[in-house]
Image (cartoon, rainbow, N blue to C red):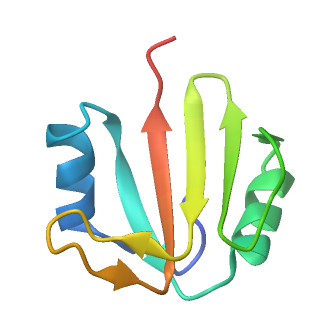
Amino acid sequence: MPVYPGAKYDEATSKALKESMGFNGACYRHDRSIAKVAEFYRKQGLESMGEVTKEGALFTKGKINVTMQSPWMNMKTGAMMKDTLISIVQNGF
């Protein structure tokens, strides 16, 4: 699955996603809005699973889920982050 252009890998959040939640995936961050990121994944052929809002969106294709959140909570510090978190996860279904 392609990563949104210019998004930066977030090692700490990816680690928390894997260790705390048991997901096989990676997290990336960008300063673009949810709408811009969602449009990119729509153009990649992913299906939207519900409404795209300014706070979040969920897309899927095959066994891959892509979620976008803004704002989002840093799981390690509890701080609210104002950029967009993009999580690309392989589901087990």
Near-viewer residue (53 or 85):
53
Question: Quadrant location of residue 41?
Answer: bottom right
Quadrant of the drawing holding the N terminus:
top right
| Residue 93 percent across, percent down from the top left | 52, 11
| Residue 15 percent across, percent down from the top left | 17, 52
Q: Is residue 34 left or right of residue 47?
A: left
Kindly tell me whether residue 2 is visible in this rendering: no
Q: Residue furthest top?
A: 93
Position of 93 relative to 78 (above/below)? above
Near-viewer residue (35 or 5):
35
Residue at 24%, 31% (x, y): give it: 22
Residue at 53%, 81% (x, y): give it: 6
Position of 86 relative to 64 (above/below)? below
Question: Quadrant location of residue 32?
Answer: bottom right
Near-viewer residue (44 or 66):
66
Residue at 22%, 72% (x, y): give it: 78
Position of 52 relative to 64 (above/below)? below
Kindly tell me whether residue 91 is visible in this rendering: yes
Residue at 28%, 70% (x, y): give it: 74
| Residue 73 percent across, percent down from the top left | 35, 70
Near-viewer residue (70 or 90):
70
Q: Is residue 18 left or right of residue 50?
A: left
Q: Is residue 10 left or right of residue 5?
A: left
Question: Quadrant location of residue 3?
Answer: bottom right
